[in-house]
Image (tube, rainbow, N blue to C red):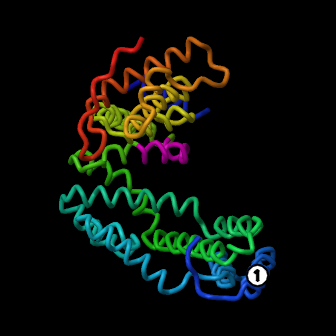
């Protein structure tokens, strides 16, 4: 534990169909919207209200298309036993989800932890003032006249959706959202599907954005990191694709899970390329030729990357099904 605390302490301190309008009318609306984007937010008006006002000036997707999109999502989630907890805004299902999780339903705990983590990030990163600034940048981008109406309708849909998500998440309350790791840990200890890797990814992300908070309870942070590393190693051993993504991301940046390491990042990246390659074409060439060598790494480093990437693949992914219903890939020929 002393080593874990010491290492952690060192890190801590370092286009769709739209309603019909004439081309001229569409261009006029867009021009007006662009002009209004540069106007200051009126005194006493909050950013959310200003964002709604500016979005109201953009072309919108037709009601028929919005209804069709909603039906499509509902059909997708209807096939998932927990779709009723994923599809509506979190504030509408939070009480039901939490009650189920507290009764011991580990899948409910997994959904609650995952959605709370998503909302926590939304509340931090997609505030109305940030969305307003992003909209201003979007409106400055060149617009092809032929596709202007469809593009602006897409912009409207995107920002309206993100604002609605922010407000729904905010209604849940920060204290509840801060419990996301607690619920994911409970779900992972109960063997809920995908909860363990979700815990790893969430802890790594939250640790990177809240150093001060983790410093305040560094012993707990060290325990969480130990658990995250253990569950990540289990995911790799089980041949989970997402484990490779997490390893790559962790080594690509100076985070709490692992120190930044370019060689490790590229070795896991090569293993992921091999996993993906056997599902398509070019796998044999990728295996025979190794990863594409670039940058200022030495030949010895690239040799290590190639050897480790192959070892990861052979140990954890070679015997796994190619797809959900596929057969294991044939044994690899020994590399020359």
Whether 207 is among the magenta residues is yes
From this viewpoint, is residue 232 visible? yes
- Residue 230 picture location, percent across and down: 32, 33
Task: Please tell me whether mark 1 sits on a helix, a strand or a loop.
Answer: helix
Residue 41 among magenta residues: no
| Residue 329 placement: quadrant | top left
Taking the image as shown, residue 316 lies to the left or right of residue 12, namely left
Q: Position of residue 66 (x, y in %)?
A: 48, 80
Mark 1 nearby-residue class (10 Å; few <14, some 14–19, many ≥20): some
Quadrant of the image occupied by residue 47: bottom right
Q: Residue at (65%, 84%) from the top-left corner?
A: 56
Q: Quadrant of the C terminus?
A: top left
Residue at coordinates 31% horizontally, 44% vertically from top-left?
196
Residue that mark 1 sits on: 27
Q: Position of residue 312 (x, y in %)?
A: 37, 25
Q: Residue at x 62, y 88 (%)?
A: 20
**Is 173 situated above or below 322?**
below
Q: Is residue 260 left or right of residue 142?
A: left
The answer to which image quadrant residue 163 occupies is bottom right
- Magenta region: 201-214
Residue at 31% of width from left, 59% of height from top?
111
């Amino acid at each position: 534990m002393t080593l874990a605390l010491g290492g952690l302490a060192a890190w801590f301190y370092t286009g769709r169909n739209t309603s019909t309008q004439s081309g001229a009318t569409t261009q006029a609306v867009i021009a007006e919207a662009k002009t209004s984007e540069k106007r200051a937010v009126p005194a006493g008006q909050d950013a959310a209200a200003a964002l709604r006002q500016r979005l109201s000036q953009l072309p919108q997707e037709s009601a028929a298309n919005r209804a069709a999109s909603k039906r499509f999502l509902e059909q997708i989630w209807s096939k998932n036993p927990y779709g009723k907890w994923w599809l509506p805004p979190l504030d509408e299902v939070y009480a039901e989800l939490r009650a189920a999780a507290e009764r011991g339903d580990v899948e409910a705990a997994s959904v609650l932890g995952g959605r709370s983590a998503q909302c926590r990030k939304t509340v931090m990163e997609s505030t109305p003032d940030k969305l307003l600034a992003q909209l201003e940048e979007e409106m400055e981008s060149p617009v092809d006249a032929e596709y202007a109406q469809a593009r602006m309708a897409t912009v409207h849909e995107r920002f309206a959706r993100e604002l609605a998500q922010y407000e729904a998440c905010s209604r849940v309350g920060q204290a509840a959202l801060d419990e996301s790791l607690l619920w994911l840990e409970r779900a992972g200890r109960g063997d809920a599907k995908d909860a363990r890797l979700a815990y790893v990814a969430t802890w790594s992300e939250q640790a990177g954005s809240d150093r001060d908070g983790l410093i305040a309870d560094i012993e707990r942070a060290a325990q969480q990191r130990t658990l995250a590393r253990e569950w990540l190693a289990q995911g790799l051993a089980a041949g989970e694709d997402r484990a490779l993504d997490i390893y790559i991301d962790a080594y690509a940046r100076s985070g709490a899970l692992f120190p930044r390491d370019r060689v490790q990042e590229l070795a896991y990246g090569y293993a992921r390329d091999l996993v993906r390659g056997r599902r398509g074409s070019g796998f044999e060439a990728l295996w025979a030729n190794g990863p594409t060598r670039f940058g200022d790494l030495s030949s010895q480093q690239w040799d290590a990357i190639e050897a480790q990437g192959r070892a990861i693949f052979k140990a954890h992914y070679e015997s796994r099904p190619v797809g959900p219903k596929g057969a294991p890939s044939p044994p690899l020929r020994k590399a020359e």
